[in-house]
Image: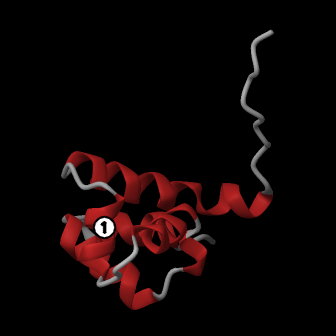
């Protein structure tokens, strides 16, 4: 018997921040930055904190989001488009 991983459907809140989550992970992957590197960029000692913030960008402080965007080279227009929902 094969044990398949359980998946859950995205909630409305998850769907709202999906573009921002994809943008952050995409630029981190393009720059070959793992979660440990992202944690260092944000000034955190534990990579798990950075992992939680990237998974749930709605909990990220604005200064952390701006800093991470700057360090990863994300154009501000792209960051605004992904972060601001109308």
Position of residue 20 measured from the top left corner of the image (x, y, whole percent): 48, 61
Vertical order, 45 against 27 (above or below):
below
Position of residue 73 measured from the top left corner of the image (x, y, whole percent): 19, 65
How many numbered marks are there? 1
Residue 46: name its quadrant: bottom left
Q: Quadrant of the N terminus?
A: top right
Colour treatment of the image: secondary structure
User: 57 and 42: which one is in front?
Assistant: 42
Identified at 46% across, 51% down, the residue is 22
Say few, some or many: other residues with alpha carbon within 10 Å of mark 1 (under 14 / 14 to 19 / 20 or more).
Answer: many
Position of residue 2 measured from the top left corner of the image (x, y, whole percent): 75, 13
Q: Which residue is mark 1?
A: 38
The residue most toward the front is 1
Instruction: Give SS at disc 1.
Output: helix
Side of 43 where 52 appears, left or right: right
Position of residue 40 measured from the top left corner of the image (x, y, whole percent): 26, 75
Q: Quadrant of the C terminus?
A: bottom right
Side of 45 where 1 appears, left or right: right
Identified at 48% across, 68% down, the residue is 48
Identified at 51% across, 71% down, the residue is 53
Side of 48 where 36 appears, left or right: left
Vertical order, 9 against 19 (above or below):
above
């Amino acid at each position: 018997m094969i044990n398949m991983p359980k998946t859950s459907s995205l909630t409305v809140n998850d769907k709202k921040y999906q573009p921002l989550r994809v943008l952050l992970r995409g630029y981190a992957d393009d720059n070959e930055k793992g979660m440990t590197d992202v944690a260092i960029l944000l000034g955190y000692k534990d990579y798990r904190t950075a992992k939680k913030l990237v998974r749930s960008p709605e909990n990220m402080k604005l200064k952390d989001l701006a800093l991470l965007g700057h360090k990863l080279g994300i154009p501000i227009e792209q960051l605004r488009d992904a972060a601001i929902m109308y």
